[in-house]
Amino acid sequence: MKKPDALQGSLDLLVLKILERRPRTHGYGIMTAVKDASDDLLRIEEGSLYPALYRMEEAGWIRAEWIKNDTGRRARVYELTAAGRKQLGLEESRWHAATAAINQVLRTV
Amino acid sequence: MSLWSRVANVFRGDRLNREISEEFESHVAEAVASGRSEREARRALGTYARHREEGHQARVIGWLDSLCADAIFGWRQLMKRKVTTGAAILSLALAIGACTSAFRLVDAMFLRPMPVSAPASLYAISYHGFDAKTKAPESWDSNSYPMFREMRKAVMEQADLSAVSYVSHVDLTYGSDAEMEKAYRQSVSGSLFSNLGLRPVLGRLLAEDDDRVPGAEPYAVLSYDYWTRRFGKDSQVIGRRLHMDGAVYEIVGVASKGFTGTEPGTMTDMFVPTMMEAGSVNNANSFWLRIFVRVKPCVDVRSLAGKMDAVFRVWEKNRAKTFINFPKYLLDTFPREHLVLKSAAEGASSMQADYGSALTVLCVLVGMVLLIACANVANLMSAQAAARAREMALRVSIGSGRWRLVQMVMVESAMLGLIAAGLGLLFAWRATPFVVSKINPPDNPARLVLPADWMVIGFGLAMAIGVTLLFGLLPALRASGVKPVHALKGGDEPVAKKRSMYALIAAQVAFCFVVLFVAGLFATTLSKLTKQPIGFSPRRVLVLDTVTQHPEPPVKWDQMAAALRTVPGVETTALEDWPLMSGTMRNDHISVNGAAPSDVLAFFLRVSPGWLETMRIPMVAGRDFRDSDTSPSVAIVNEAFAKQYFNGANPVGRTFETRGPDRVNAQYEIVGLAGDVVYRDLREKILPQAYVPLHRAANLRADTPISAQTLSAATLQPMQGVTIVVRTASDDSILLSETLRKAMTRIDPEFRVSTIQTQTELVNAQTIRERLLASLALFFASLALLLAAIGLYGVLNYAVLQREREIGVRIALGARLGHVVRIVTAQVLVMVVAGGIAGWALGLMLVRYVQSLLYQVKGNDPAMLAVPALVLLMAVVLSAMPAVIRAARIDPATMLRAE
């Protein structure tokens, strides 16, 4: 869970963003959504998705609920909380600032 | 996720894990549904175990989770050893229960402030002095009303004073005289309620204006408790009338809830103005009031006390000028006492004075019992920890931190402590009222408010934490400090562990010795007191405190006594002023042959003919009174009287005069000599006593010489309250009380029994404190002995278990039984002896503080020390026996084969 990961920061951002756009999505759905939205370029590592979800749930950014989906299987779906929305804004601006900085470095050097 | 759900998740780990696994499975199913192979999906997701672990960690509070795990594990450990756990909990619970009970008593009597405003600035006046002859310190707190008035005026600027009478148990009725009932009454000065900042629940309270004119302000305020008990909180009670002491009172209000008077130990039902004691408010020689002092802000209490002391001394010196025939040596040093202001936030009562030191001693005893119990459990836990050394070592080797291990063992200890404290609280809940109910002098049983609130619960909790630290911390540190290499190798445990167990044994023995010693002192005191000859036979004697509505001529009283003699089951009856050993007394200076009165005062009691016979007091010489004898003319004296005033010669036929400080001189001819009896107090040496006829001539003038002629001409003084003594035929004399009550009203409706007691009750009442102390101390002593014996047994048994191998080898090599016994017991015996000596020293130190509670017992009496030593020795031998037998029975063959 504490593994340093280049995508560590971006994983939270991606999950939060997906949940903002498509509330009440289960873990697998989040994963495929990221894949689809990025045209298969980005892929969340399945093994780190759930720990991240539990961590964000603990932090109070998202909340979970058990529902019965169309196939009659119980699934755990997630949605953003108010704190999660705030966090998403924060992460987004942080991402933009970081990428802008990196772009600037790439341009000037 | 909220904190609460994380806390909750700690306690539903199973469900949590189920949810995680379900989500896990649902993920795989989705993957399969979208066309992936199950194996591949599972591999991509990682192991379920890792998910469970991480998910679990994220959703619970770490420390709480580990605590919870420890609790479950600890509970299993405790349940695995049901017997030892039970013994530990039981001994701790008894000790904690005893401590909590003692705390409740101390709290109710000494700690809990009265429910009044700003109790901290409330003080009570008391006087500290010393006896003129023995120089023994004396103190009291009674005041006269004129002195209260003077004092109040003198310190008006610095303090507000209120006077409160001692609580008296009075007869009163809300209807006809046939429906008399009893209530506890206090006379209070009008300023009391405003001074204490009390508010009425109903109606109004007494004010200054209700307390100005003697005998003219018959208003009564009820206590909330009495109002609830007697009237069921009826609001119509205001304005109701009641008859009491020949006056008609009107109920004007109910005092605030929780206020039960100013005397812890007695609950006042009714408050009336001091002015209603019309006979006493102007009498400077009548001491019947306590004075409460509300010190104003910014006033120095010590200088205020100094000022009041000065007022008191001037007042007393002036009062002494009115004394007649007062011995000069007393007058020279008068007054011998100084006024002191004592904090009275908790009220002031004689029970505080009587039971204060007794309670302190009991607290020390229960504290020692608690320490013994803690030592026991500590040894138990140490032995337990030693047995678990391998488990601990394993935990350390797979990476458990030291504090984690301490936490684990402490959680186990805390569970023991908490369960024991819970049981102890339950014990105290019943035990304290039981103890209070034993403080039951006839007609005035102790009534103590015993709140069971957060104070008591908090105390119990503090006890639980305290004992857990006491008995648990050391074993926990020890257990966690295990060296895995040694333990896993199966090597011997460090010597230090055994040493600390033995030190605890020594401490236990020391405390046990002290408890036994003190209990022995109290038991001996009680037995000395109860074996004290009292000179009369209280068995089968009933005392009927009898009153009439109006003063009746003595003849009618004689007729009543005679009529009661015909009641079936009654042997004889007689009349007296008041019962022997009831505490009431009258004394006077005696002058023989016109000489100056002696220092020694004589007790007086007016009795009817046949009284000596009824009380079974032997007549040594002379005759009993006759019906025609009146007072003053003849007297019967006791042997101490003859010894004191007639040098032991037969005094029959001689005469003496009384010379009271403020009484008329009267001359008596001695007609009889009776055996010595205890008149007032079992503890005081028998003083000269004179019995005089109950019939008293009225209107005798001091200057008229008394002769047969003047006496026969005088009429007899009517009487309104006399005690009738009844000797019954059967031992269950109290069974006759209802019959006698009814018989009396039938014979003459003017007469009414106020209280009926047995003379035995009165005699026993004098040793209530001693009885209580002796029985409680003996209870604690047996508890201490039992605990110490169990502790010793446990440690010895453990020592034998540890050395089985060694002993087996020794036996194989030819060690004899005596040798084996010595190996097993030598060290422990040294500890026992050391502990005994320490306990002996401790006991001798303590005895100074209990001396005031003892009677004819010296703390340094060798017998008082020998008995506990012997008892302890016997207990030691008994508890060592199983271990010794076990050691002796070790079969070397089996032992060595096991190696």
Image (cartoon, helix red, strand yellow):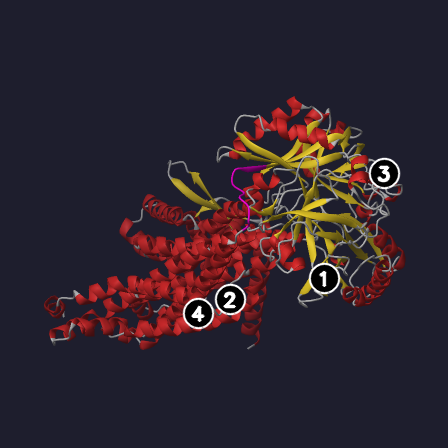
Of the pair B866 and B74, the residue shown nearer to us: B866
> Would you name the residue on which mark 1 appears?
B599
| Upstream in sequence: badge 4 or badge 3 | 3
Q: What residue type is labelled 2?
A: Lys
Q: In this view, does B98 lie to the left or right of A108?
A: left
Q: Specify whether B857 is left or right of B307.
A: left
Q: Which residue is drawn at 44% across and 71% down?
A: B840
Query: Is residue A22 or residue B379 the one in the foreground?
Result: B379
Q: Where does label 4 land, which residue?
A: B862
The question of residue B541 being in magenta is answered with yes
- First in sequence, mark 3 or 1: give its number: 3
- Residue where numbered disc 2 is placed: B858
Label 4 vs label 3, nearer the camera: 4
First in sequence: mark 4 vs mark 1: 1
Residue beneath disc 3? B215
User: Marks 4 and 1: same chain?
Assistant: yes
Instruction: Find numbered disc 3 in the image and state the secondary structure of the residue it sits on.
Output: loop
Chain name for mark 3: B
Vertically, is B748 above or below A50?
above
